[in-house]
Amino acid sequence: MNNDERICSIALTLCPGIGHIGAKRLIDGMGSAAEVFRQRKELPDLLPGVTPAVVAALDSPAAFSRAEQEMEFVEKNRLMCLTLKDEVYPSRLRECDDAPVALFFKGNVDFNRLHVIAMVGTRNATEYGKQFCGDFLRELAALCPDVLVASGLAYGIDIHSHRAALANHLSTVAVLAHGLDRIYPYVHRNTAVDMLANGGLLTEFLTETNPDRHNFVSRNRIVAGMSDATIVVESAEKGGSLITADLAVGYHRDCFAVPGRITDVNSRGCNMLIRENKAALFQSAEDFVAAMGWNSAAVSAKQKGIQRELFPELSETEEMIVRILSSRGDLHVNALVVEANLPVNQMTALLFELEMKGVVKAMVGGMYHLLI
């Protein structure tokens, strides 16, 4: 993919009145951002719901000028601009209706590995929360060393999650509420630099963007959308981490919360999530890994030496899913999406067909088990 698609994707985000969802729908409908602009005048005939106002908004030379300026910064500083068409774009996030059509990244990481978690919480972390971050990620590193930890580089639980991941040699990515021309808060700069070798910094925002309050809310959808599960460590009754949890639930991702004493202000949000069945209670990495089906399922399947012939009535894509489950054991639907490189909606439909044919069984927590 050349820079034209990247420039067009950036420009699309700058066109007034389009928005995240509108931009993604246009690209999904036309196949690329470049095609959206190339056939701008024909869009009302090609895509339902496209109005003359949208066509007029897309006629924006200023947006292209700003996009070209941003790409100069990207190239000069050896950053990456990821569009929806790039294979390295976070595949889990791509399936969200409001996924950014362009992301900017500095670092070294595979966003599309099999295990990705988000760890979020209050900026006023207690010793209880800080210790949990360290203990949990130390245990998780032993059970699942390939996991990627996403958070927001903020004070409190976020920065302690990043540092605990680094201390245990886990990949970690910070999703920022501003462009890559700065680090906020600045006191976390050294940690941000340490993350670049095995992780990095990710944002949807252009340079010269201030870390305004509403940007933090916007970035939370990226944290939730790029992850298999969101873990809320500590939270008051209101806060950004609860927004991230709600977003995760809305994206049909797993959500977990660390329980605390009812008298602790910074545990009220977690306890509320558990009480309202928005998040599952867990107390250790072992609990979490078991709930996600990341433990011994694959090992036991291999030990049993599952051997089978593919059913003649299965389609080629269905056979691929069966092969994955046969070799890997029970898997979460998000893991299947990554392994098969298929959209979530297509994967869901295929799994339903396989379940109706008696080939797979849906289990608790979005896991799927091969029956034969």
Image (tube, helix red, strand yellow):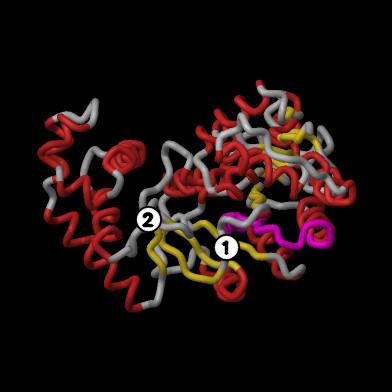
Mark yes or no: residue 284 visible: no
* Quarter where residue 256 is shown: top right
**Image position of 258 with respect to 203: above or below:** above
Of labels 2 and 1, earlier in sequence is 2
Amino acid carrying mark 2 in the image: Thr
Mark yes or no: residue 76 visible: yes
Question: Dividing the image into 4 quarters, which one contains the N terminus?
Answer: bottom left
Q: Which mark is residue 241?
A: none
- Residue sitting nearer the eye, 307 or 85: 307
**Image position of 81 with respect to 189: above or below:** above
Q: Are marks 2 and 1 in contact (CB under 8 Å)?
A: no
Residue range (magenta): 141-156
Mark 1 residue element: loop
Residue 153: image location, x then y, percent:
58, 60
- Residue 299 located within the stretch drawn in magenta: no
Tell me which residue sits at (56%, 42%) in the image: 240
Question: Dividing the image into 4 quarters, which one contains the C terminus?
Answer: top right
Q: Is residue 45 left or right of residue 122?
A: left
Question: Which residue lies under the disc numbered 2?
Answer: 83
Residue 60: image location, x then y, percent:
13, 50
Tell me which residue sits at (74%, 28%) in the image: 361
Q: Is residue 16 left or right of residue 366?
A: left
Tell me which residue sits at (12%, 37%) in the image: 42
Tell me which residue sits at (47%, 39%) in the image: 96
Question: Which residue lies under the disc numbered 1?
Answer: 110
